[in-house]
Image (cartoon, rainbow, N blue to C red):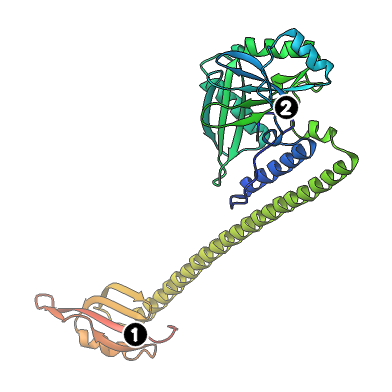
Amino acid sequence: MTDSAGTAGSRVLDVPGSPRRWLTRLRNLITQGLILAHDAPSDDRPLSEIYIEIADHGPRLRDAQSDISPPLDDGALADLSAAGIRDVDLVFAGESCLEISFGLPDAPLHELRAMIESEIQYRSPFSADASVSFWTAEEKPDGRWRITAAVTLRAPTMDLVARLARHGLAVGTVRWNGGTKTFAARPDWTQERTEGKEMGWKAALRGLSPVWKATVIGVAMLNLSAMLLLAQTTFRHSAVSQQADKARLELSRTAQATATLRALGDARAMSTERLALTGVLADLLPDGVWLDQLLIEDVTVTLVGFGPSAAEVTRLLTSLPQITDIRFGSPVTRDNSQGLERFRILATLSGPVE
């Protein structure tokens, strides 16, 4: 890609990436296709038969077919115009330009051009009003761009462009033959454009033949349909994921509520069993037997208390069909001063207490 309204010279590489990067590259491919259909890349343009070389010795006319170097004056320019020559290339060489190189991330072409222009102004030692520049951008396999720019002074360059215009001549291609890289470009400052500074697919589309326009519009509609399908698929996937997350949340809440209800039911059943067993024991145990604790855990019943005879308490408990496996949980202790035995009796609750 170069800094012109009608040329593009880089290829779009087919490497994997995110959907956003894929869409960016697809847009860039369509834009570059439109531009290439409208005009050939600057680097593919042959050097004009007569060109102007701008080097350390100043601007000179050069003949591409010979070593003739006629003087660059109004007479020579008038002769070129009279000979039917309309486009003259500018070739910068030597120290006529300052070369600047830098890298940028992947972006849509119109945004990339703006980023390149801004970066050149930032890196250039000259102000934007005092300089002009032209550049080329090469896409790397990782999707990044490598930019090489040439910056020169505005006043002498634009004076030369104005001299050519007065004789009906226009600048064809601007070339850089110095520094580390040789490239060609067609920057906006080389000629007056009826579109002003309009760049991109609109200007390119207007220059296409009707057949090309129909082809380009068809390809654009096909790619637009692909992008809409991708966006719709992504939206549906997001909606399904949200519904699945909502369903999982509702299921978790239902499970928690079920567990809480089950726990409450178990607690209620235990309380009911305790009340029922308390009433049965109150009727069963004789006077003089006191219970400090009555615990029911699952099917295990624990009775802690004291009375005249712990053995008598166990004998009475055996009369209850719902209580089995009666045993002492700890040794029985006796208080001779009061004639009472301290007991801890364990039993198994095998059925509901009635």
Relative to 346, 262 lies left or right: right
Q: Is residue 24 above or below residue 59?
A: below
* The image quarter in which residue 2 lies: top right
Furthest-top residue in view?
74
* The image quarter in which residue 348 lies: bottom left
Q: Could you say where residue 306 lies in the image, as x and y percent from the top left?
A: 21, 77
Please name whichever residue, 171 or 26, is drawn nearer the observer in this view of the structure. 171
Which SS class for mark 2? loop
Quadrant including the N terminus = top right
Mark 2–mark 1 distance (CA, rounded to whole Å): 110 Å
Check disc 1 and give the amino acid type: Thr
Quadrant including the C terminus = bottom left
Residue linked to disc 1: 348
Q: Nearer the viewer, mark 2 or mark 1?
A: 2
Relative to 292, 320 lies left or right: right
Check disc 2 and give the amino acid type: Ser
Please name whichever residue, 260 or 244, is drawn nearer the observer in this view of the structure. 244
Neighbor class of circle 1 (other Cα within 10 Å; few <14, some 14-19, many 20+) is: some
Q: Could you say where residue 98 lies in the image, as x and y percent from the top left?
A: 53, 21
Identify the disc placed on residue 48. Answer: 2
Identify the residue at horizontal 28%, vertical 87% (top origin).
Answer: 326
Q: Could you say where residue 195 lies in the image, as x and y percent from the top left?
A: 80, 23
Identify the residue at horizontal 74%, vertical 42% (top origin).
Answer: 33
Furthest-left residue in view?
337
Relative to 132, 310 lies left or right: left
Which SS class for mark 1? strand
Identify the residue at horizontal 49%, vertical 65% (top origin).
Answer: 260
Q: Could you say where residue 270 lies in the image, as x and y percent from the top left?
A: 42, 74
